[in-house]
Amino acid sequence: MLIGGILYWQRNNSTIDGVITHSTAAQRGAYDSNEFHWMYVRDGVVGIWREPLGHGPGTAGLVSIRDPGGGHLTENYYIQVGYEVGVLGLLLFILLNIWVYVRIWRSKSPWAPMLLVSFWAYLFINMLLHIWSNEAVVAQWWLLAGIAIAGSGARATANTDV
């Protein structure tokens, strides 16, 4: 709360404007970066509301900017999933994430603590960026999660065979 108060008190400081809030005095009165982010999020939610079955894969997010008809940035990976595959697809994606989280939590893998902490970090990052669209991040996290889950199942089977 103290940091928030300091940022508010220094809101007209050029460093705060340029680095923290991504706006400048010249931009005041016009859309700044933060307003664009909120506009994209709002438009994505409206798009989900209007098409609850989804607009189709590739219609939102970073890949959609290649569409000659125009793309739709959502600035939030979860809104992107809902926009593309609808409410049911988003629900399935969330349930898959919960299922994997619980399986890792119950595993005895030495990687479990790292995976659980990074899960929460990626969850929050996905609220602002499309981190699951980055193949390097996706590959390392989901492969390690799969190994941790599979390894815990193999140990459980080995212990019951004795």
Image (cartoon, rainbow, N blue to C red):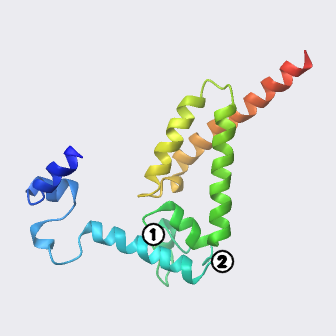
Distance CA(mark 1)–CA(mark 2): 17 Å
Residue drawn at x 16%, y 78% as measured from the top left: 29
Q: What label does residue 136 carry, if any?
A: none
**Disc with the residue nearer the chain's start (1 vs 2):** 2
Residue drawn at x 8%, y 56% as measured from the top left: 13
Q: What is the secondary structure assignment of the residue under circle 2?
A: loop
The one of 37 and 64 positioned closer to us in this rendering: 37
| Up-down relation of residue 80 to residue 46 (above or below) | above
Residue drawn at x 53%, y 42% as measured from the top left: 119
Tell me the quarter of the image containing the C terminus: top right
| Residue 78 horizontal/vertical position (percent) | 53, 62
Q: Is residue 86 left or right of residue 7?
A: right
| Residue 14 horizontal/vertical position (percent) | 9, 57
| Up-down relation of residue 115 to residue 78 (above or below) | above
| Residue 60 horizontal/vertical position (percent) | 52, 72
- Count of numbered circles in the view: 2
Query: Which three-letter amino acid code belongs to the residue tagged 1?
Result: Thr
| Up-down relation of residue 22 to residue 112 (above or below) | below
Residue, disc 1: 74
Query: Which three-letter amino acid code belongs to the residue tagged 2?
Result: Leu
Q: What is the secondary structure assignment of the residue under circle 1?
A: loop
Residue 111, quarter of picture:
top right
Residue drawn at x 43%, y 57% as measured from the top left: 129
| Residue 89 horizontal/vertical position (percent) | 66, 66
| Up-down relation of residue 87 to residue 121 (above or below) | below
Residue, disc 2: 53
Q: Is residue 152 left or right of residue 41?
A: right
The one of 146 and 127 positioned closer to us in this rendering: 127
Residue 45 shows up from this direction: yes
Q: Is residue 153 left or right of residue 96?
A: right
Residue 57 shows up from this direction: no
